[in-house]
Amino acid sequence: MTQPFMNRELLQELVLRWHEARLDDGGADRLVAMVNLHAETFNEYAKDSFFDTEPSNFDRMLAEESRDD
């Protein structure tokens, strides 16, 4: 299993630094789960191309993800 991209403590630190707001543990845990899921999903595609330089690959990835298997 790979290391998660984000953890609760780091997320809370970033929110405090960037927005000067404290994020409670429950909210941080929900955001961490979402961030890590997105990172896991998109990191697989990042091996193939860079979305900002190859938008057609991004469209292909979205089409693949939207298929009903």
Image: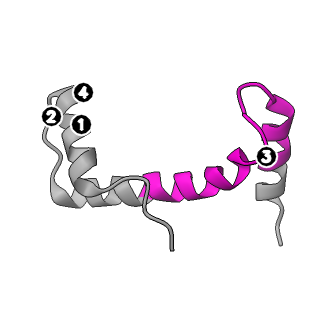
What is the x, y in percent for residue 58? Answer: 78, 39
Q: Are marks 1 and 2 in contact (CB under 8 Å)?
A: yes
Q: Are marks 1 and 4 in contact (CB under 8 Å)?
A: yes
Mark 1 and mark 2 lie on one chain; the one further toward the N terminus is 1
Please name the residue that numbered disc 4 is placed on: 18
* Tally of numbered tags: 4
What is the x, y in percent for residue 20? Answer: 15, 28
Please name the residue that numbered disc 2 is placed on: 21
What is the x, y in percent for residue 28? Answer: 26, 54
Q: Left of 56 or right of it: where is 58?
A: left
Helix, strand or loop status at disc 2: loop
Please name the residue that numbered disc 3 is placed on: 48
Say above or below: 46 vs 8.
above
Label disc, if present, on residue 15 of the rendered structure: 1
Q: Are marks 4 and 3 in contact (CB under 8 Å)?
A: no
Q: Main secondary structure of the magenta part?
A: helix
Residue at 62%, 56% (x, y): give it.
41
Q: CA distance from mark 4 to mark 3?
A: 32 Å
Q: Left of 69 or right of it: where is 34?
A: left
Q: What type is the residue that disc 4 sits on?
A: Trp
Q: Residues within 10 Å of mark 1 (few under 14, many from 20)?
A: some
Q: What type is the residue that disc 1 sits on?
A: Val
Say above or below: 36 vs 13.
below
Q: Nearer the viewer, residue 2 or 24?
A: 2
Q: What type is the residue that disc 2 sits on?
A: Ala
